[in-house]
Amino acid sequence: MPKGSDLFVAALENEGVDRIFGVPGEENLDVLESLRNSKIELVLTRHEQAAAFMAATHGRLTGRPGVCLATLGPGALNFATGAAYAHLGAMPMILITGQKPLMSAKQARFQIVDIVGSMKPLTKMTRQIVSAGSIPAIVRDAFRVAMEERPGPVHLELPEDVAGEETANDILIPRHALDWPVASAATLDLAAETILAAKRPLVMVGAAGNRPSLVDPLSSFVARARIPFFNTQMGKGAVTGGSNLYMGTAALSEGDYVHEAVDRADLIIAIGHDTVEKPPFLMKSAGGSKVIHIGYQSATVEQVYHPDLEVIGDIAASVQGLGERLEGRLTEDQGMLDLRQRIFARINDRAEEDRFPVTPQRIVHDVRQVMPEDGIVCLDNGMYKIWFARNYRTHVANTLLLDNALATMGAGLPSAMMAAILHPDRRVMAVCGDGGFMMNSQEMETAVRLGLNLVVVILNDSAYGMIRWKQAVDGFPDFGMSFGNPDFVRYAESYGAKGSRVTAVEDLVPTLEAAFAGGGVHLVDVPIDYSENTRVLVDELRNRTPNVECA
């Protein structure tokens, strides 16, 4: 007779799960045996945090929950950052943890932590499974909750004795059709009238507009409505294809060049803005642009975001309806398009400067050169994230993955590994600072073991560069931010990967091209000069506004 773990794994297979990422423990041995006899691949990682980042990125790129596995206590607690990453970033994910038997306590309280309680603020739902017979319904419900808007992580705790319990229950047939409510025709009419009445409308695409299912509807809307648009950091790449209507990315909260377009606009159509991101612009209480909020859910009202009109419902249906109402009825704002040229001229300034160590602008420029349009760049969190958000132009959706919600360090390498697994035919690059890379650098072994084709770029300044920069901007002495690094080339080679070091600016593109051509896992150590942070992001922008805040 099958046992609870067999039923659990069968329920996962029934949901279309083909991989589980994680580090099993004693309390998962029944699940591990059931996995061995299933079609699901176990991707063994070197740390639970990396497993959670990989599962979250699976959800982000596919729209289907990624699944990760850990044991009780310390293993489960190592999921905390990954759970928060998915929760704030709206990425569907299922976290599975083990637990001591419910019906006996031969080891007393050894390693027992209330993981269900710990996960409550970090997930959409957290449940302990108390009987094998309930497994099919609980697993089905977990996937439903994880995928519903707003997507996010769901945690299931499977105790050791429940996993081993004999059972005969059948799995449930999954129902994957998610029909979202749609905005009324009257609301769409009002939104269209408001847009047509505006003199200088501007579209903003936010994090909730950047879903795999929205690529075509949003791209079609931009083409039909012909309204200039910009995006938040996590909205970057939501619209596919090049467009002369694209005004840039709001990598700062105010004062950047794209904010000249925001200041010029008398109406901002915010599609999928999620206030979990740091503000892409600061909405004024009076005298500023009006804002229309288009989202799956009502806007979260904040001090800097309080829309004048809301269009609530399926975003795809909303933008399709608006596109039908607006097509051919708007006159292009030539002043906005002229401004676009000036914005990009300023952002692209010094992109080919020959200084060494390499400047952030040159790194972004050269990475763009070696990455094809469908190549995927996965960023860790650091100062370079702002530069990539501002300067890196995307043409295909979901080809620049960054985190502006939890904004955690350590996610860049695992995210890129997941992208390489899902898209083995495309170039994939992780861009990490030396600080963030070392937080999960042990996953280089996992990447090599999996036979991935992946280039890992380490931007090396021997410091926690973003906080060091903010420390300087705030007038504090340079203290507590510097550290030493290993020899990254030899470090990569010790895992069986390849390693290269860039020693001149003109060597960056050839080194990256050779790394991709050679295949496998290849680390490239690039010294970086962050003096441009102050020149461009502080001194130059302060000439336009008295307050510059990083987003």
Image (spheres, grey):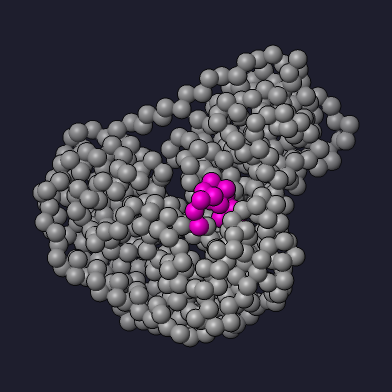
Residue 23 occupies which quadrant of the picture?
A: top right
Q: Quadrant of the C terminus?
A: bottom left
Q: Is residue 21 magenta?
A: no
- Residue drawn at x 43%, y 38% as measured from the top left: 149
Q: Nearer the viewer, residue 19 or 433?
A: 19
Tell me residue 374's x, y (percent).
Answer: 42, 55
The residue lying furthest to the right in this view is: 106
The residue lying furthest to the front in this view is: 517
In the image, residue 509 above or below residue 223: below
Asked if residue 18 can be seen in this view, the reply is yes
Q: Quadrant of the N terminus?
A: top right
Q: Main secondary structure of the magenta part?
A: helix
Q: Is residue 124 left or right of residue 105?
A: left
Q: What count of labels does the image hold?
A: 0
Q: Is residue 428 left or right of residue 227?
A: right
In the image, residue 66 above or below residue 528: above
- Residue drawn at x 20%, y 33% as measured from the top left: 185
Tell me residue 4's x, y (percent).
Answer: 72, 23
Q: Is residue 307 left or right of residue 485?
A: left
Q: Which residues are magenta?
A: 414-427
Tell me residue 308's x, y (percent).
Answer: 25, 49
- Residue drawn at x 61%, y 53% as measured from the top left: 452
Residue 26 occupies which quadrant of the picture?
A: top right
